[in-house]
Amino acid sequence: MEFHIVLLPGDGIGPEIVGQAQKTLEAVARKYGHVFDFEPLLMGGCSIDKYGVPLTDEVLEKAKGSDAVLLGAVGGKVGQSAWYKLPPEKRPEAGLLAIRKGMGLFANIRPAYLFPQLKHRCPLKEEVIKDGFDLVIVRELTGGLYFGKHETTVENGLRTAHDTLIYNEEEIRRIAVRAFDMAMKRRKKVSSVDKANVLASSRLWRQVVEEVAKDYPEVQLEHVLVDNAAMQLVRDPGQFDVILTENSFGDILSDEASEVTGSIGMLSSASLGSGKCGLYEPSHGSAPDIAGQDIANPLATILSAAMLLRYSLDLDKEADDVESAVRAVLAAGYRTPDIMSEGCQKVGCSQMGDLVVKTLLETQ
Ligand code: NAD
């Protein structure tokens, strides 16, 4: 099959890690007889340097017209790079908000999986980790607190600030459907996280999630208050399969979940809309402190490419194959410096990419 994939390597380690993911996708194409037509474009600081803006209309249109977009990361050393002398809406990170909004991506999917070989990096105790955990956070991305009205006024002589948290039933329904669909392909459990004891938006959230659940009788639904969810994630992460939540709760919980895995360089993510095209990127930033040294861990980006195969191109077998190759390379003891441990062999970014490609091509 033939697919058009837009690459947005971005800044810092972005070009190094996206290079390894592209190599991996090229190996998938060779192995399975697909044609992937890659179009590298600029976004973030590199786009500011060339065009004066972090995302041009042309790049956005090309991204929207593609089958999928693979992003590295954007941004430089905050406070040091000249990009941060610009107003916030012109900085590299503004490109991220603009592309998510422009592509209508309302669902952010962030898996948090504990690789058995990296168990020692998990900050939790053995008795809490038990057999490990494998959960995915489905976060609403374009509504709620971050997109409501924000204003600061003076009331009764006091500076007073208001932020509004708005959701309509349609926004809740479409993200809930995404979460239940995902649960059907996994262990069939959805934990919907809200603050229904306090917030009206959460009470509507609960009602609509229950309506959607009626279409998925095989999926077990539970409601968890957000404060309890934050606690349960460190007390017993293995209890979760799919966590469904609104924008700001999801922002915080997904960072907590990634911290619990202990390896930021391993975590992939996807942002999806109503169509097939999605935006795939590692959960970490552009790591300017290690850029250009060929020591960054490319596995989060390679695993994001596996998500791209699964969710945008419907190539499940190929996605499984990439994930297995990553597990096999770790099992063989290869590590980039960020996940290095005693007895393992240290490799660089491009060497890690080569190992994944070799394993992928060698296995049936
Ligand atoms: P970061 O994730 O870039 O780095 C945090 C730490 O983790 C650093 O020590 C870095 O070296 C390390 N690290 C990150 N990814 C790694 C990898 N693949 N391999 C090995 N080590 C890795 O976060 P930060 O330092 O807070 O931000 C740096 C820049 O990235 C900033 O400009 C920030 O705005 C931007 N940022 C971009 C995105 C994005 O593009 N989606 C997300 C977060 C931060």
Image (spheres, rainbow, N blue to C red):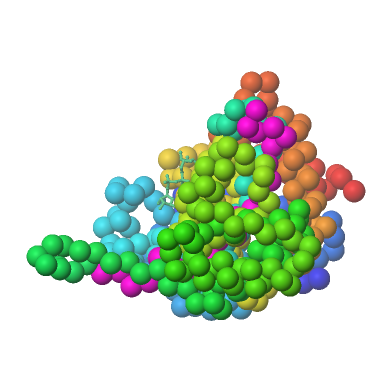
- The residue positioned farthest toward the front in the image shown: 197
Total label count? 0
Q: Position of residue 42 (x, y in %)?
A: 49, 65
Kindly tell me whether residue 308 is visible in this rendering: no
Q: Is residue 268 magenta?
A: no
- The residue positioned farthest toward the right in the image shown: 364
The residue closer to the viewer here, 258 or 337, is 258
Q: Is residue 301 above or below residue 160?
A: above
> What residue is shown at x 73% (from left), y 43% (from top)?
326
Q: Position of residue 5 (x, y in %)?
A: 65, 68
* Quadrant where the image shows the N terminus: bottom right
Q: Is residue 133 magenta?
A: yes
> What residue is shown at x 15% (from left), y 68% (from top)?
155
The quarter of the picture where residue 26 lies is bottom right
Q: Is residue 73 above or below residue 62?
A: above
Q: Is residue 291 above or below residue 32?
A: above
> What residue is shown at x 50% (from left), y 77% (from top)?
168
The quarter of the picture where residue 95 lies is bottom left
The residue closer to the viewer here, 192 or 98, is 192
Q: Position of residue 4 (x, y in %)?
A: 68, 71
The residue closer to the viewer here, 72 or 153, is 153
Instruction: Give, as a single range, the part of the protein colored magenta.
Output: 127-151
Q: Position of residue 338 (x, y in %)?
A: 55, 34
> What residue is shown at x 74% (from left), y 37% (from top)?
329
Horizontally, is 46 left or right of 137 in the view? left
